[in-house]
Image: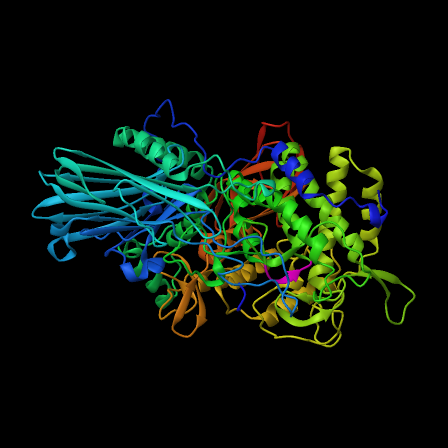
Amino acid sequence: MNPSPHDPSRRGVLSLATTAGLTAALGALPAFTASAAPADRPADVPLPAGAARERLWWRAPGDEGSLIEQGLPVGNGRIGALAGNDPGRELLLITDATMWTGGLNDTLDQDGQFPYGRADFGSFTLLARLTVDIPDHDLGSVHDYRRTLDLAQGVAGCSYVRSGVTYRRELYASHPDDVIVLHLTQSGGGRHTGSITLTGTHGEQPDTADSFGAALPNGLRYGAAVQARGTGGKVTVHGTRIDFTGCQELTVVVCAGTDYAPDAAAGFRDASLDPERLARTKARAAAAVPADALRRTHVADYRALYGRLGLSLGTSTAGQRALDTWERLHARARDGEPDPELEAAYLQFGRYLMISGSRDSLPLGLQGLWLDGNDPDWMGDYHTDINIQMNYWMADRTGLSACFDALADYCLAQLPAWTDVTRRRFDDPRNRFRNTSGRTAGWAVAFSTNPYGGSGWWWHPAGNAWLCATLWEHYEYTGSREYLEKIYPLLKGACEFWEARLLPVTLPGTSKEVLVDDHDWSPEHGPQDARGITYAQEVVWTLFGAYCTAAAALGRDTLYADTVAALRRKLYLPEVSPTTGWLQEWMSPDNLGETEHRHLSPLINLFPGDRIRPDGSTPKDVVAGATALLTARGMENFGWANAWRAACWARLKNAGNAYRSIVNNLRPSTDGRNGTASNLFDIYEAERGRGIFQIDANFGTPAAMVEMLLYSRPGHIELLPALPDAWAASGHLEGVPARGGFEVDLRWRDGRPTHVTVRSVGGRTTTVAHGSTTRQITLRPGASVTLKGFGR
């Protein structure tokens, strides 16, 4: 994260209306829709052996004043909540991914920046608060309290004993029913008596207890609704409060949403939608369903995604298992002993967050779907120079390709606005990054973006290429022609931007002419007026290659693809500095920035790209230069920066450094320092004593862990490339996707594969390698093969 036809005149910049029509044709849907609840309810879904190891637990509820570090997150991809789980006062901080202030924000200030504040750019904010007060269950009157997050089923909750009665509470966000469900039960004759209050967070004055609706100053309408059903007692309404008395069980159902729509031509609004009314309808429908049926439906839906990947990194000790999650984090840091089950659970927690935060709505921003207030740092936005990309590194790698769609849909929905603002503002004389050629085409983005086509901070010229590279990698996993057609306008528009931007220069001391990026800034590092920065050169090289492959696959724009291929051949690619021995970040032998800077931008084609490979296909001096630069950057940084380092070390097959970077992120955060909070959210140390939740490390770290166990590119799969000693004794990875259209089941013992099965999910031919052993396989889609001989 950040502290702080070929004639250029006829490139055919897509008009707002034209591109919006394309978006509609591709089937983009509003985020909050009147979808029907399931007609058929599933039976119980059996859990696999070992599922108990994927249950996190704590000995105390979350403090209301620190829920961002202690609250348990739930979500259905659109709405979410942080829960405190206090026996006497359950508090839910409720969010909707589209609950954003601000707007288009498409003008530059006198310094050439897009305004970047809550009053102009806007911010992600809370939608509602729900409290369930049970006064006689205050924490002092209960014992044997235990709080859990069941990753295998997507259910949070707690249990405790009061007056000899065991009370249990479960919380989850159902995607099929589109509601958050809180279910309170007991065994032993106990009762629940208390009240339920639903309030807004923007000064709303509701006059009913079960719902409210309002609008933000930017015109975004929103609403929320609650329903409660009790057994063995009474549920009544008193003004703006719902009371329940003597209930053996209590089910509380909440729904919320906004009238946001991913349609630039409609101003990103669905004028036909009444959010409050829709929330009431959905809440009432769900409340009419028996609690066990609601739960079964949620678990079946959640398991259909979560169950696609099986993982074991080894066995922890009985002593480690006896500790709660916060204690285990402290013990791991204090004793230095591997805790493979905890480390595997951390990866699975990332998958839980992805399923909970990225389905059928906006993508995950800096804080994902979860907030504890209306003023998140950096507005909880979409940063385009690492954060939003890192958020989605793990989606395909961990069997959650369906969750990636939110990012692709977001980019497509924003394309009309991004294209329009590029046409109007990129050549503004106040833009320090404007093209020297005076020509502008295609689309670009700023460092920060919001859901309304809005821009914040500086222009970020290479951001379009990095977004496209991320979108392209998803295609390499899925091979979906429908998806490729969907993202093709993004790829082509970004190429058009770079065709207009690249400058021809002659390399000093030679007669060779190359193309370089115009004056630019290696993200947040060094001079802001450098030409040919490594980051841009590398990511544009990837963009051009992806576009040419896409055009060929779709049979489109052959002449333009030839033009792009010719541009790619002339791109300057970075050299190794004779002064530092590092891969140069700028076209200079000197280090023009901070040696241990958090960003690894010049290594973007080590990871997440893979032009730089330690397999003999890349010149040895380039690999050595990349290794030297990575070494110089250091091993201690913010969580997201450690995650990027881990992935790069995995690509270099340095298991020790990769694992060390992973472990660095598992250190417990105390006093706001970098590390992991008690609820496993990653904490970013903004300044001493003040920590900020930033979710990208929760996704980047699992991505790096998978890279340590399996590396793939189309046509090649490598097993256990960076397996650390801590995980070497035994383990398995089942259902792990590989680029090129394959899935792999892998088991290992003593650092060597003992079982390898490869299934085609669309791919046909690939090589599978471990050490010096290589197998080439050819499969029909849907077929599989079990390979022998890798364990020798």
Q: How many marks?
A: 0
Q: Is residue 777 above or below residue 753?
A: above
The answer to whether residue 167 is left or right of residue 481 is left
The answer to whether residue 555 is left or right of residue 732 is right
Residue 153 visible in the current orientation: no
Write down the quadrant of residue 409 in the picture.
top right
Q: Residue at x 39, y 34 (%)?
A: 278
- Colouring style: rainbow
**The C terminus, quarter of image:** top right
The answer to whether residue 235 is left or right of residue 408 is left
Near-viewer residue (74 or 32): 32
In the rendering, at what x and y percent does residue 373 appear? Answer: 37, 58
In the rendering, at what x and y percent does residue 147 appear? Answer: 25, 50
Outermost residue, right side? 511
Tell me which segment is drawn in magenta: 456-461
Is 597 included in the stretch rendered in magenta?
no
Is 457 included in the stretch rendered in magenta?
yes
Residue 55 visible in the current orientation: yes
Near-viewer residue (283 or 476): 283
In the rendering, at what x and y percent does residue 254 appear? Answer: 32, 40
In the rendering, at what x and y percent does residue 556 appear? Answer: 78, 35
Q: Residue at x 35, y 33 (%)?
A: 282
Near-viewer residue (31 or 505): 31
